[in-house]
Amino acid sequence: MELKKLIRSVPDFPKKGILFCDITTLIKDSKAFNYVIDSICEHYKGKKIDKVVSTEARGYLFGGALAYKLNAGVIPVRKPGKLPAEAIKEEYTLEYGTDALELHKDAIEKDEKVLVFDDLLATGGTALASCKLVERLGGKIVGISFLIELTELPGKNKLKDYDIFSLIKY
Amino acid sequence: MELKKLIRSVPDFPKKGILFCDITTLIKDSKAFNYVIDSICEHYKGKKIDKVVSTEARGYLFGGALAYKLNAGVIPVRKPGKLPAEAIKEEYTLEYGTDALELHKDAIEKDEKVLVFDDLLATGGTALASCKLVERLGGKIVGISFLIELTELPGKNKLKDYDIFSLIKY
C-alpha cells in the first residue's frame, strides 16, 4: 500500500521552517489504518508482547490498536503532571526544544516484554526516553516501531541498542 | 468482567476536591482492555461505522482500537492549535473550567456514519462539542460511547438527542 501518498505535508507547522508530516489524512482512511496496524503486528509475529507503550498524543491512536491486536495491555507515557498516580520522569531533547515524559511506577512489571510505538522517528528523543522509563521499571524492550522515520536525522543512532521497525521512510 | 475493580480512584487530582478515575490500571490489563473494546463494538453490531472520532488524549487509546476493530478510519479531535491543517472549532464547558476542541475540515465527509468515543461522561461538554464538530461537516452520529459515566452529573441530559452507551456507571 502506498502510504506516503496519504500523508499530508504542512509547511511551517508547528513553527516556521518545519515541514510537518500530517498523518490524519492517512488514519482517516480505514484501509490504510488497518494496514498500518496489521503490518506492525506482523513484524513482531511469534514474539510475546505484554504491553504496548506509546507517547502522547498521536501515538495513542496507534498504541491502543496495536495493544488490542496483540492482546497486550496499553500504557500511556505522558507529558509531566498529567498522570494521576506516582510516576517516574525522563527528560529529553526534541526537534523543537526540550521536554520530559512520565510513566506510572506500576505501569510495567519486572521482565515484562514491551513494544514501544511512536508515530515519528526524528531526533529519537521521545522514543529513547520511553525506553529508559520502561527499563527503569524492569521491563524488556522487544522493539520500537515508528509509522514514519526521517532517515536524514540522527535519531536512529540514539536507538542503536534496540530493534527498530519503521513503516514509512523519508 | 468486573471493570470497576480495575479503576483507581485518585483524590484531589487534577485539583483539590476532585476524585479522579484513573483508567491506566484498567487498560494495562490486556484482558480488560480487549473486553472493553469488544463490548463497545458489540453494541454497534450490524451498524455501519465509517469513522471513529475520539478526544485528546486518553480517548485516543480507545479510539484507535475501536476503529481498527470496526474497520473504520480514526479521527482525532484536538485541543486548539494542535491540528496542522484547516480546522473548525467548538467551545465547551468542562468539569474544571472552559476549553475548546478542533476538527480538521476534511476529517469527515457528508453523510458519513460516525461513532464518537470519550473516556468519561461527566458534564458532557467534550462529547457534545465533538458531535457538533462532526455534524457541522455533514457527518451523522451513530452513537456516543463512554468507558465511564458519572450518573450523578447532568452530562446525559445535554446528549439526549444521541444514542449513548456507557460501559461503567458510577
Image: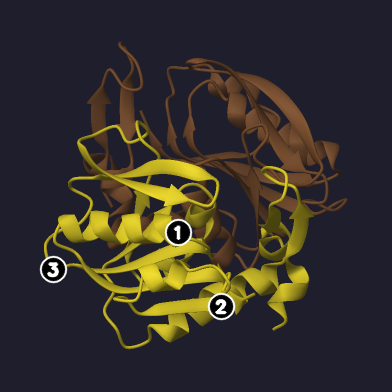
Chain colours: A brown, B yellow
Q: Chain of mark 2?
A: B
Asked if badge 2 and badge 3 are on a common chain, one would say: yes
Looking at the picture, which amino acid does disc 1 mark?
A: Gly
Q: Nearer the viewer, residue B169 or B23?
A: B169
User: Does label 2 or label 1 sit earlier along the sequence?
Assistant: 1
Q: Residue at x 85, y 53 (%)?
A: A109
Q: Which residue is mark 1?
A: B64
Looking at the picture, which amino acid does disc 3 mark?
A: Asp
Q: Which residue is mark 2?
A: B167
Answer few, some or many: residues within 10 Å of disc 1's Cα (few below 14, many 20 plus, some between 14 and 19): many
State which mark lies toward you, 2 or 3.
Answer: 2
Residue B115, given in percent of the width and then of the height, sits at 34, 69
Disc 1, SS: helix
Looking at the picture, which amino acid does disc 2 mark?
A: Leu
- Image quadrant in which the C terminus of chain B is located: bottom right
Q: Which residue is mark 3?
A: B111
Residue B91, given in percent of the width and then of the height, sits at 33, 45
Q: Chain of mark 3?
A: B
The relative height of residue A28 versus residue B69 in the rendered view (above or below) is above
Q: Is residue A106 left or right of residue A11?
A: right
Disc 3, SS: loop
User: Does label 2 or label 3 sit earlier along the sequence?
Assistant: 3
Q: Is residue A49 left or right of residue B98?
A: right
